[in-house]
Amino acid sequence: MRTYMKAAAAVMMLLVVLFPLASQGQRETEEVTTVRFLNFSAAGGNEPHLEAVRDAFEADHPDIRVSLETIGYDDYFTQLQTRIAGGQAPDAFELNFENFAAYANRGQLKDLTGMLDSAAVNLDDLNPQAMEAFSLNNRQYGLPASFSTVVMFYNKELFDQAGVSYPADDWSWDEAHEAAAAVRDLGDRIFGLFQPIHFHEFFKVVQQYGGGLLNESGSEFTVDRSENIKALEVMVSRIQDTNVMPSSRQLSGMGDWDLFISGRLGMLVTGIWAFPAFTEDADFDWDIVVEPKAEQRATHFFANGLSIHRDSRTADAAFAWLSYLSASETAGQIRLDAGWELPASSHEGIVAAYASRTPPENREAVFTSLDYLVTPPVITEFSRMQDIITMHLQAAADGSVSPAEALRRAQQELEAQITL
Protein backbone atom coordinates (compact mmCIF):
# COMPACT_ATOMS: atom_id res chain seq x y z
CA MET A 1 0.00 0.00 0.00
CA ARG A 2 2.83 2.35 0.88
CA THR A 3 4.52 1.54 -2.46
CA TYR A 4 1.28 2.33 -4.34
CA MET A 5 0.94 5.69 -2.52
CA LYS A 6 4.50 6.62 -3.43
CA ALA A 7 3.87 5.77 -7.08
CA ALA A 8 0.66 7.79 -7.12
CA ALA A 9 2.44 10.75 -5.58
CA ALA A 10 5.15 10.54 -8.22
CA VAL A 11 2.55 10.53 -10.98
CA MET A 12 0.86 13.56 -9.47
CA MET A 13 4.16 15.42 -9.29
CA LEU A 14 4.85 14.59 -12.94
CA LEU A 15 1.43 15.86 -13.97
CA VAL A 16 1.99 19.08 -12.05
CA VAL A 17 5.22 19.60 -13.97
CA LEU A 18 3.92 18.59 -17.40
CA PHE A 19 0.55 20.36 -17.46
CA PRO A 20 1.95 23.87 -16.97
CA LEU A 21 4.48 23.16 -19.69
CA ALA A 22 1.76 21.86 -22.01
CA SER A 23 -0.42 24.86 -21.24
CA GLN A 24 2.49 27.20 -21.87
CA GLY A 25 3.23 25.50 -25.21
CA GLN A 26 -0.43 25.77 -26.16
CA ARG A 27 -0.44 29.48 -25.33
CA GLU A 28 2.72 30.03 -27.37
CA THR A 29 1.15 28.24 -30.34
CA GLU A 30 -2.01 30.29 -30.05
CA GLU A 31 0.01 33.52 -29.98
CA VAL A 32 1.55 32.85 -33.39
CA THR A 33 -0.54 34.45 -36.15
CA THR A 34 -0.52 32.98 -39.64
CA VAL A 35 -0.97 35.32 -42.61
CA ARG A 36 -2.01 33.76 -45.92
CA PHE A 37 -0.37 35.67 -48.78
CA LEU A 38 -1.19 35.14 -52.47
CA ASN A 39 1.01 36.56 -55.23
CA PHE A 40 1.91 36.28 -58.91
CA SER A 41 5.18 38.16 -59.33
CA ALA A 42 7.31 35.40 -57.77
CA ALA A 43 6.16 32.97 -60.46
CA GLY A 44 8.70 31.89 -63.04
CA GLY A 45 11.72 31.46 -60.81
CA ASN A 46 11.48 34.13 -58.11
CA GLU A 47 9.79 31.91 -55.52
CA PRO A 48 13.10 31.36 -53.61
CA HIS A 49 13.63 35.12 -53.40
CA LEU A 50 10.18 35.69 -51.94
CA GLU A 51 10.83 32.87 -49.47
CA ALA A 52 14.09 34.60 -48.46
CA VAL A 53 12.17 37.80 -47.69
CA ARG A 54 9.61 35.78 -45.72
CA ASP A 55 12.33 34.03 -43.72
CA ALA A 56 13.98 37.34 -42.83
CA PHE A 57 10.62 38.80 -41.81
CA GLU A 58 9.74 35.84 -39.59
CA ALA A 59 13.15 36.05 -37.90
CA ASP A 60 12.27 39.63 -36.92
CA HIS A 61 8.64 38.74 -36.10
CA PRO A 62 8.61 35.38 -34.28
CA ASP A 63 4.91 35.78 -33.51
CA ILE A 64 3.93 35.85 -37.20
CA ARG A 65 4.07 33.10 -39.81
CA VAL A 66 3.52 33.86 -43.50
CA SER A 67 2.01 31.15 -45.67
CA LEU A 68 3.08 31.84 -49.26
CA GLU A 69 1.20 30.79 -52.38
CA THR A 70 2.30 31.76 -55.87
CA ILE A 71 0.07 31.50 -58.95
CA GLY A 72 1.13 32.37 -62.50
CA TYR A 73 -0.17 35.68 -63.82
CA ASP A 74 -2.38 34.13 -66.51
CA ASP A 75 -4.51 32.33 -63.90
CA TYR A 76 -3.98 34.62 -60.94
CA PHE A 77 -6.92 37.02 -61.12
CA THR A 78 -9.41 34.31 -62.00
CA GLN A 79 -8.27 32.32 -58.97
CA LEU A 80 -8.27 35.37 -56.70
CA GLN A 81 -11.77 36.48 -57.62
CA THR A 82 -13.11 32.92 -57.32
CA ARG A 83 -11.71 32.64 -53.81
CA ILE A 84 -13.06 36.01 -52.76
CA ALA A 85 -16.51 35.16 -54.13
CA GLY A 86 -16.42 31.82 -52.31
CA GLY A 87 -15.48 33.32 -48.95
CA GLN A 88 -11.96 31.89 -49.12
CA ALA A 89 -10.03 35.09 -49.67
CA PRO A 90 -6.36 35.16 -48.60
CA ASP A 91 -5.50 37.62 -45.84
CA ALA A 92 -3.22 39.59 -48.14
CA PHE A 93 -2.53 39.50 -51.83
CA GLU A 94 -0.75 41.17 -54.73
CA LEU A 95 -2.52 43.42 -57.22
CA ASN A 96 -1.15 45.10 -60.29
CA PHE A 97 -1.91 48.76 -60.89
CA GLU A 98 -4.38 48.05 -63.67
CA ASN A 99 -6.63 45.79 -61.56
CA PHE A 100 -6.28 47.67 -58.29
CA ALA A 101 -9.11 50.15 -58.91
CA ALA A 102 -11.62 47.39 -59.65
CA TYR A 103 -10.96 45.67 -56.32
CA ALA A 104 -10.93 48.95 -54.39
CA ASN A 105 -14.16 50.17 -55.99
CA ARG A 106 -15.90 46.89 -55.16
CA GLY A 107 -15.04 47.38 -51.49
CA GLN A 108 -12.89 44.26 -51.35
CA LEU A 109 -9.81 45.94 -49.86
CA LYS A 110 -9.09 47.10 -46.33
CA ASP A 111 -8.41 50.80 -45.90
CA LEU A 112 -4.80 51.01 -44.68
CA THR A 113 -4.74 54.76 -44.10
CA GLY A 114 -5.04 54.53 -40.33
CA MET A 115 -2.36 51.83 -40.14
CA LEU A 116 0.43 53.65 -41.97
CA ASP A 117 1.91 55.25 -38.86
CA SER A 118 2.20 51.85 -37.17
CA ALA A 119 4.64 50.44 -39.74
CA ALA A 120 7.91 49.18 -38.28
CA VAL A 121 9.72 50.28 -41.45
CA ASN A 122 10.03 53.73 -42.97
CA LEU A 123 7.25 54.13 -45.53
CA ASP A 124 8.58 57.59 -46.38
CA ASP A 125 11.25 55.83 -48.46
CA LEU A 126 8.64 54.50 -50.86
CA ASN A 127 8.52 55.99 -54.33
CA PRO A 128 5.76 58.67 -54.17
CA GLN A 129 4.28 57.82 -57.57
CA ALA A 130 4.22 54.12 -56.76
CA MET A 131 2.55 54.91 -53.42
CA GLU A 132 -0.04 57.11 -55.11
CA ALA A 133 -0.85 54.34 -57.58
CA PHE A 134 -2.47 52.34 -54.79
CA SER A 135 -4.62 55.05 -53.27
CA LEU A 136 -8.19 55.95 -54.12
CA ASN A 137 -10.12 59.04 -53.03
CA ASN A 138 -7.26 60.03 -50.73
CA ARG A 139 -7.37 56.68 -48.93
CA GLN A 140 -4.54 54.15 -49.06
CA TYR A 141 -5.72 50.67 -50.05
CA GLY A 142 -2.35 49.16 -50.87
CA LEU A 143 1.41 49.50 -50.56
CA PRO A 144 3.69 49.30 -53.60
CA ALA A 145 5.89 46.21 -53.81
CA SER A 146 7.80 47.04 -56.98
CA PHE A 147 7.58 49.13 -60.08
CA SER A 148 9.16 49.02 -63.46
CA THR A 149 9.33 50.74 -66.80
CA VAL A 150 9.92 49.83 -70.42
CA VAL A 151 13.02 50.82 -72.39
CA MET A 152 14.53 50.01 -75.77
CA PHE A 153 17.18 47.27 -75.82
CA TYR A 154 19.61 47.04 -78.71
CA ASN A 155 22.18 44.55 -80.02
CA LYS A 156 25.50 46.36 -80.40
CA GLU A 157 26.98 43.74 -82.69
CA LEU A 158 24.17 44.02 -85.24
CA PHE A 159 24.51 47.81 -85.22
CA ASP A 160 28.25 47.45 -85.83
CA GLN A 161 27.62 45.07 -88.73
CA ALA A 162 25.06 47.46 -90.23
CA GLY A 163 27.45 50.39 -89.86
CA VAL A 164 24.99 52.61 -88.01
CA SER A 165 25.38 54.56 -84.80
CA TYR A 166 24.06 53.15 -81.56
CA PRO A 167 20.69 54.47 -80.38
CA ALA A 168 20.66 57.48 -78.06
CA ASP A 169 18.34 58.51 -75.24
CA ASP A 170 17.08 61.45 -77.33
CA TRP A 171 16.22 59.47 -80.47
CA SER A 172 12.98 59.91 -82.36
CA TRP A 173 11.05 57.02 -83.87
CA ASP A 174 12.10 58.22 -87.33
CA GLU A 175 15.74 57.68 -86.38
CA ALA A 176 14.91 54.28 -84.91
CA HIS A 177 13.12 53.25 -88.10
CA GLU A 178 16.12 54.23 -90.24
CA ALA A 179 18.42 52.12 -88.07
CA ALA A 180 15.94 49.24 -88.09
CA ALA A 181 15.93 49.24 -91.89
CA ALA A 182 19.73 49.08 -92.00
CA VAL A 183 19.79 46.13 -89.59
CA ARG A 184 17.01 44.39 -91.54
CA ASP A 185 19.20 44.52 -94.65
CA LEU A 186 21.75 42.25 -92.96
CA GLY A 187 19.75 39.13 -93.89
CA ASP A 188 16.38 37.49 -94.37
CA ARG A 189 16.37 36.11 -90.83
CA ILE A 190 17.55 39.36 -89.21
CA PHE A 191 14.98 41.94 -88.08
CA GLY A 192 15.46 45.55 -87.07
CA LEU A 193 12.81 46.23 -84.43
CA PHE A 194 10.17 44.54 -82.33
CA GLN A 195 7.48 46.39 -80.40
CA PRO A 196 4.49 44.19 -79.50
CA ILE A 197 1.12 45.26 -80.85
CA HIS A 198 -1.10 44.77 -77.83
CA PHE A 199 -2.97 46.86 -75.32
CA HIS A 200 -0.07 47.66 -73.00
CA GLU A 201 2.06 49.05 -75.81
CA PHE A 202 -0.80 50.74 -77.62
CA PHE A 203 -2.07 52.83 -74.68
CA LYS A 204 1.44 54.27 -74.34
CA VAL A 205 2.23 54.78 -78.02
CA VAL A 206 -0.98 56.74 -78.64
CA GLN A 207 0.14 59.20 -75.98
CA GLN A 208 3.43 59.63 -77.84
CA TYR A 209 1.29 60.84 -80.75
CA GLY A 210 -0.89 63.08 -78.56
CA GLY A 211 -3.80 60.65 -78.33
CA GLY A 212 -5.51 58.67 -75.59
CA LEU A 213 -8.12 56.00 -74.99
CA LEU A 214 -10.50 58.20 -72.95
CA ASN A 215 -11.43 61.87 -73.01
CA GLU A 216 -9.98 64.17 -70.35
CA SER A 217 -12.84 63.62 -67.90
CA GLY A 218 -12.74 59.85 -68.36
CA SER A 219 -16.41 59.81 -69.31
CA GLU A 220 -16.09 58.63 -72.93
CA PHE A 221 -13.95 56.25 -74.97
CA THR A 222 -11.89 57.92 -77.71
CA VAL A 223 -10.18 54.85 -79.13
CA ASP A 224 -10.84 55.76 -82.78
CA ARG A 225 -9.54 59.33 -82.63
CA SER A 226 -7.15 60.40 -85.39
CA GLU A 227 -4.01 60.45 -83.23
CA ASN A 228 -4.63 56.83 -82.20
CA ILE A 229 -5.15 55.76 -85.81
CA LYS A 230 -1.82 57.38 -86.74
CA ALA A 231 -0.07 55.53 -83.91
CA LEU A 232 -1.48 52.16 -84.95
CA GLU A 233 -0.65 52.79 -88.60
CA VAL A 234 3.00 53.32 -87.65
CA MET A 235 3.08 50.17 -85.52
CA VAL A 236 1.45 48.02 -88.20
CA SER A 237 3.58 49.44 -91.05
CA ARG A 238 6.68 47.93 -89.44
CA ILE A 239 5.26 44.51 -90.24
CA GLN A 240 3.31 45.01 -93.44
CA ASP A 241 5.29 47.73 -95.25
CA THR A 242 8.96 47.81 -94.25
CA ASN A 243 8.97 44.40 -92.51
CA VAL A 244 11.60 45.59 -90.05
CA MET A 245 9.41 43.76 -87.52
CA PRO A 246 8.56 40.08 -88.10
CA SER A 247 5.02 38.91 -88.69
CA SER A 248 3.59 36.10 -86.59
CA ARG A 249 4.30 33.75 -89.51
CA GLN A 250 7.95 34.84 -89.64
CA LEU A 251 8.28 34.36 -85.89
CA SER A 252 7.05 30.75 -86.24
CA GLY A 253 6.14 30.61 -82.57
CA MET A 254 9.35 32.24 -81.33
CA GLY A 255 8.88 34.93 -78.67
CA ASP A 256 10.32 38.42 -78.90
CA TRP A 257 12.80 37.76 -76.07
CA ASP A 258 13.98 34.58 -77.76
CA LEU A 259 14.45 36.45 -81.03
CA PHE A 260 16.60 39.05 -79.29
CA ILE A 261 18.63 36.48 -77.34
CA SER A 262 19.26 34.54 -80.56
CA GLY A 263 21.08 37.57 -81.96
CA ARG A 264 18.60 38.11 -84.79
CA LEU A 265 16.95 41.34 -83.57
CA GLY A 266 18.42 44.83 -83.58
CA MET A 267 16.06 46.60 -81.17
CA LEU A 268 13.42 45.41 -78.73
CA VAL A 269 10.96 47.46 -76.70
CA THR A 270 10.35 45.59 -73.47
CA GLY A 271 10.52 45.86 -69.69
CA ILE A 272 13.52 46.20 -67.43
CA TRP A 273 12.55 42.85 -65.91
CA ALA A 274 14.39 41.36 -68.92
CA PHE A 275 17.78 42.33 -67.46
CA PRO A 276 18.48 38.98 -65.71
CA ALA A 277 17.47 36.84 -68.70
CA PHE A 278 19.46 38.87 -71.22
CA THR A 279 22.48 39.04 -68.93
CA GLU A 280 22.51 35.28 -68.55
CA ASP A 281 21.49 34.12 -72.02
CA ALA A 282 22.61 36.70 -74.60
CA ASP A 283 26.17 36.05 -75.84
CA PHE A 284 26.60 39.49 -77.42
CA ASP A 285 26.97 43.05 -76.13
CA TRP A 286 23.68 44.84 -75.58
CA ASP A 287 22.56 48.04 -73.94
CA ILE A 288 19.43 50.17 -73.44
CA VAL A 289 18.13 53.66 -74.16
CA VAL A 290 14.99 55.56 -73.29
CA GLU A 291 12.18 54.65 -75.69
CA PRO A 292 12.17 56.97 -78.74
CA LYS A 293 9.63 59.76 -79.08
CA ALA A 294 7.04 60.69 -81.68
CA GLU A 295 5.22 63.99 -81.11
CA GLN A 296 6.23 63.70 -77.48
CA ARG A 297 7.84 61.20 -75.13
CA ALA A 298 5.91 58.66 -73.07
CA THR A 299 7.15 55.61 -71.19
CA HIS A 300 5.46 52.88 -69.22
CA PHE A 301 4.73 52.78 -65.53
CA PHE A 302 4.00 49.30 -64.24
CA ALA A 303 3.48 48.72 -60.53
CA ASN A 304 2.57 45.80 -58.31
CA GLY A 305 0.92 46.53 -55.00
CA LEU A 306 0.09 44.72 -51.78
CA SER A 307 -3.38 44.80 -50.22
CA ILE A 308 -5.32 43.22 -47.36
CA HIS A 309 -8.75 41.72 -47.80
CA ARG A 310 -11.44 43.68 -45.97
CA ASP A 311 -12.52 40.61 -43.93
CA SER A 312 -9.08 39.40 -42.87
CA ARG A 313 -8.89 38.46 -39.20
CA THR A 314 -5.14 38.96 -39.18
CA ALA A 315 -5.03 42.49 -40.58
CA ASP A 316 -2.40 43.82 -38.15
CA ALA A 317 -0.04 40.92 -38.80
CA ALA A 318 -0.74 41.13 -42.53
CA PHE A 319 0.11 44.83 -42.52
CA ALA A 320 3.39 44.12 -40.72
CA TRP A 321 4.27 41.61 -43.46
CA LEU A 322 3.22 43.84 -46.34
CA SER A 323 5.06 46.89 -45.06
CA TYR A 324 8.21 44.77 -44.62
CA LEU A 325 7.89 43.35 -48.14
CA SER A 326 7.26 46.82 -49.52
CA ALA A 327 9.70 49.10 -47.73
CA SER A 328 12.35 47.20 -45.77
CA GLU A 329 15.95 47.46 -46.91
CA THR A 330 16.25 43.69 -46.58
CA ALA A 331 13.45 43.04 -49.06
CA GLY A 332 14.82 45.71 -51.39
CA GLN A 333 18.31 44.21 -51.33
CA ILE A 334 16.98 40.72 -52.05
CA ARG A 335 15.10 42.09 -55.05
CA LEU A 336 18.24 43.82 -56.30
CA ASP A 337 20.43 40.76 -55.91
CA ALA A 338 17.86 38.71 -57.82
CA GLY A 339 17.27 41.32 -60.54
CA TRP A 340 13.61 41.03 -59.59
CA GLU A 341 12.10 44.32 -60.82
CA LEU A 342 12.83 47.68 -59.20
CA PRO A 343 12.10 47.91 -55.46
CA ALA A 344 9.47 50.47 -54.53
CA SER A 345 11.82 51.84 -51.89
CA SER A 346 13.79 54.90 -52.97
CA HIS A 347 16.22 54.45 -50.05
CA GLU A 348 19.53 55.99 -51.05
CA GLY A 349 21.49 52.78 -50.59
CA ILE A 350 19.10 50.72 -52.68
CA VAL A 351 18.99 53.25 -55.53
CA ALA A 352 22.80 53.51 -55.56
CA ALA A 353 23.18 49.73 -55.60
CA TYR A 354 20.73 49.40 -58.47
CA ALA A 355 22.36 52.14 -60.52
CA SER A 356 25.84 50.62 -60.17
CA ARG A 357 24.97 47.22 -61.64
CA THR A 358 25.86 46.25 -65.18
CA PRO A 359 24.80 45.27 -67.73
CA PRO A 360 23.29 47.42 -69.07
CA GLU A 361 25.96 50.09 -69.15
CA ASN A 362 23.38 52.84 -69.65
CA ARG A 363 21.32 51.91 -66.60
CA GLU A 364 20.74 55.62 -66.10
CA ALA A 365 18.17 55.28 -68.90
CA VAL A 366 15.90 53.53 -66.40
CA PHE A 367 15.83 56.61 -64.19
CA THR A 368 15.56 58.99 -67.14
CA SER A 369 12.51 57.10 -68.42
CA LEU A 370 10.78 57.73 -65.10
CA ASP A 371 10.47 61.39 -66.11
CA TYR A 372 8.01 60.43 -68.87
CA LEU A 373 5.79 57.86 -67.18
CA VAL A 374 2.22 57.41 -68.36
CA THR A 375 -0.41 55.02 -67.04
CA PRO A 376 -3.29 53.21 -68.72
CA PRO A 377 -6.84 54.37 -68.05
CA VAL A 378 -7.95 52.60 -64.90
CA ILE A 379 -11.63 51.68 -64.97
CA THR A 380 -13.65 49.06 -63.11
CA GLU A 381 -14.05 46.98 -66.28
CA PHE A 382 -10.36 47.20 -67.09
CA SER A 383 -9.92 43.55 -68.08
CA ARG A 384 -12.83 43.69 -70.52
CA MET A 385 -11.54 46.92 -72.04
CA GLN A 386 -8.09 45.37 -72.44
CA ASP A 387 -9.47 42.23 -74.08
CA ILE A 388 -11.62 44.16 -76.56
CA ILE A 389 -8.85 46.50 -77.64
CA THR A 390 -6.26 43.71 -77.88
CA MET A 391 -8.53 41.63 -80.11
CA HIS A 392 -8.95 44.45 -82.62
CA LEU A 393 -5.27 45.42 -82.48
CA GLN A 394 -4.41 41.86 -83.43
CA ALA A 395 -6.73 42.02 -86.42
CA ALA A 396 -4.90 45.12 -87.64
CA ALA A 397 -1.49 43.53 -87.03
CA ASP A 398 -2.53 40.47 -89.05
CA GLY A 399 -3.67 42.69 -91.90
CA SER A 400 -7.27 41.48 -91.90
CA VAL A 401 -8.56 45.04 -91.35
CA SER A 402 -7.04 48.50 -91.59
CA PRO A 403 -5.88 50.29 -88.43
CA ALA A 404 -8.74 52.79 -88.81
CA GLU A 405 -11.35 50.04 -89.15
CA ALA A 406 -9.90 48.07 -86.25
CA LEU A 407 -10.17 51.05 -83.93
CA ARG A 408 -13.63 51.95 -85.19
CA ARG A 409 -14.84 48.47 -84.33
CA ALA A 410 -13.12 48.59 -80.95
CA GLN A 411 -14.79 51.92 -80.18
CA GLN A 412 -18.25 50.54 -81.03
CA GLU A 413 -17.75 47.42 -78.95
CA LEU A 414 -16.45 49.34 -75.95
CA GLU A 415 -19.39 51.73 -76.02
CA ALA A 416 -21.81 48.82 -76.27
CA GLN A 417 -20.34 46.74 -73.46
CA ILE A 418 -18.83 49.13 -70.90
CA THR A 419 -20.43 52.02 -69.03
CA LEU A 420 -17.95 54.59 -67.75
Image (spheres, rainbow, N blue to C red):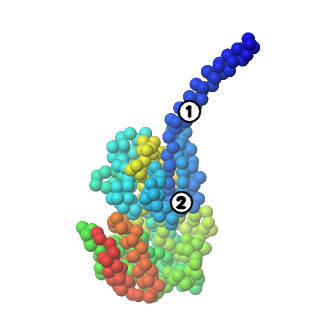
Image-based side of 254 in relation to 151, left or right: right
Horizontal and vertical percent for residue 4? 73, 16
Q: Residue flagged by tag 2: what amino acid is it?
A: Ile
> Taking the image as drawn, is residue 135 in sight?
yes
User: Which quarter of the rendering shows the N terminus?
Assistant: top right
Q: Residue furthest front?
A: 1
Residue at 33 percent of width and 83 percent of height: 408
Which residue in the protein does label 2 denote? 71
Residue 240's place in the image compared with 68, above or below, is: below
Horizontal and vertical percent for residue 70? 54, 56
**Between 391 and 79, the one nearer to me in the picture:** 79
**Between 415 and 162, the one nearer to me in the picture:** 415
Nearer the observer, disc 1 or disc 2?
Answer: 1
Residue at 35 percent of width and 85 percent of height: 404
Give yes or no for contact between labels 1 and 2 (Cβ–Cβ under 8 Å): no
Q: Residues within 10 Å of mark 1 (few under 14, many from 20)?
A: few
Horizontal and vertical percent for residue 37? 50, 51
**In which image quadrant can residue 2 be found?**
top right
Q: Secondary structure at mark 2?
A: loop
> Taking the image as drawn, is residue 158 in sight?
no
**In which image quadrant can residue 417 be found?**
bottom left
User: Which quarter of the rendering shows the C terminus?
Assistant: bottom left
**Between 156 and 26, the one nearer to me in the picture:** 26
Q: Which mark is residue 26?
A: 1
**Between 169 and 195, the one nearer to me in the picture:** 195
Residue at 43 percent of width and 44 percent of height: 313
Horizontal and vertical percent for residue 74? 51, 66
Residue 63's place in the image compared with 237, above or below, is: above
Residue at 48 percent of width and 79 percent of height: 179
Q: Residue flagged by tag 1: what amino acid is it?
A: Gln
Q: Residues within 10 Å of mark 2 (few under 14, many from 20)?
A: some
